[in-house]
Amino acid sequence: MDLLERYLQAVKKHLPGKKQDDILAELRANLESQLEDKEAELGRPLTQGEMEDWLRTIGPPILVASRYQPQQYLIGPALYPVYLYVLRVSALWAIVIYTVVNAVVIPLTSPTEASAMAAVVRAPGVLITVAAWVTLIFAAIEFGAARFPEKCSPIAGLTGKWSPSSLPPLEKDTPQGKKPRGYATAVAEVVFEFLFLVWLLLIPQHPFLVLGPGVVFLDAGPFQLAHAWWTFFWWIVALNALQVAWHSVDLARGTWRNRSTLERIAAKVFGLAPLVLMLDVRDNVYVLLKNPAVDRAHYGSALESINKSVHLGLLVVTTIVALQLAWEIAQAMVQISRGRAAAH
Amino acid sequence: MSSIENVFENLRLELRRGCLTLAVLAQLRQEHYGYTLRKELAERGLEIEESTLYPLLRRLEAQGLLVSEWREEEKRNKRFYRLSGEGQQILGQLLEEWQAINASINRIL
């Protein structure tokens, strides 16, 4: 009986506080009845070994006591899929924002390797903090829903109040040989496009971001960029801003898996426009002399060579982009004609 | 235990889980305390562990399906359970549901 008392004592430690005595009294009565029956069958008291075997079949005290706890989840099965999705999105966006903020702040305040490394080392801490907050919020929702089901508003999407008409449009089949893009890839693309845009916007004030140490020669040298480059620059900024916005909307709408043909063609057209504008610059003057009256005699022929080279380079790039655009248009027309043939 | 045995064991436990509540409610059309209820169920082919049955009785009581009272029997205080009015109603509904499911399974088989 001593072993049974010790067992009941161990169970009691893990029982819910308010009902410990009541539960224990009931458990004691049931186990003592069971023990009596066993001893009546054997015609003698159980030995120590038999008692241990019997208590072992009932189960460890903590497990027995835990079954008297009310069934509760930190985050229940109804909320868990939503929690996982929000956790994934929050973690990815936290890293996006953290990366962008540090990409801007570090070069402007303390552009050293040590600062960059410190930012990298802090990144896991940021992710853990975000995960902890998301988990805490969802645990609070679960707690509220379990304790006050009549007062908790149904969570959108879990109660049948979602609208089928708000579903993303049907995605066209992925072209043969190409895998649809994953969510992480799509988010990573937006991250890098955003970083690229920030980098672009910093260039006018911080040309070293493009030229590196060569910015010294630009400052000291006789040449300067023509005003046409500003037009080109803002076209590129606008194109990238449009891409970031478009791809962010794709992410939000759930249509990130495949880039539409229209989008690809629009990006090529929009990218071609500034190149064509630059090719049309008057007299193909892309680089100027800072002091033409002083420097023309010495640097005139070099200036001419530079402008010719830049023009040639722009011509090559424009041709490549134009060919890519033609290819995209041709592929789109082939897809359309195939689609029409299949429909007939 | 092999993986297929694990699969069977998990599915068996799931199948039993719903049936146990019905069996306990049905058996408590007559008054029992925990141990005698377990014995009765075992004699009718439904073995159930103490650590499963006794907390289940508490939960069903908390849900209003059972009522209990402490009484002395054979010089020992015991907690006796029986169906409440709501418990009887729920039992009736569950039995109908059980029979409908049983009939559907038989038709499928």
Image: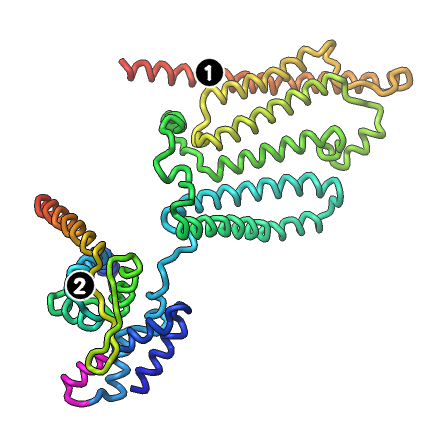
**Is residue A305 among what the camera can see?**
no
- x, y percentage for residue B51? 28, 69
Span highlighted in magenta in the image? A32-44
Q: Is residue A307 left or right of residue A17?
A: right
Image location of residue A218, percent across then percent down? 80, 29
Q: Is residue A25 magenta?
A: no
Which of these two is toward me, A12 or A21?
Answer: A21
SS at mark 1? helix
Residue drawn at (71%, 12%) of the image? A281
Q: How is the image coloured?
A: rainbow
- Seen from the viewer's position, the closer of residues A174 and A281 is A174
Host chain of mark 2: B
Q: Is residue B99 above or below residue A170?
A: below
What's the residue type where badge 1 is placed?
Answer: Ile
Residue that label 2 marks? B28
From the image, state whether disc 1 or disc 2 is nearer to you: 2
Q: Nearer the viewer, residue A76 or A238?
A: A76
Labelled disc at residue A130: none
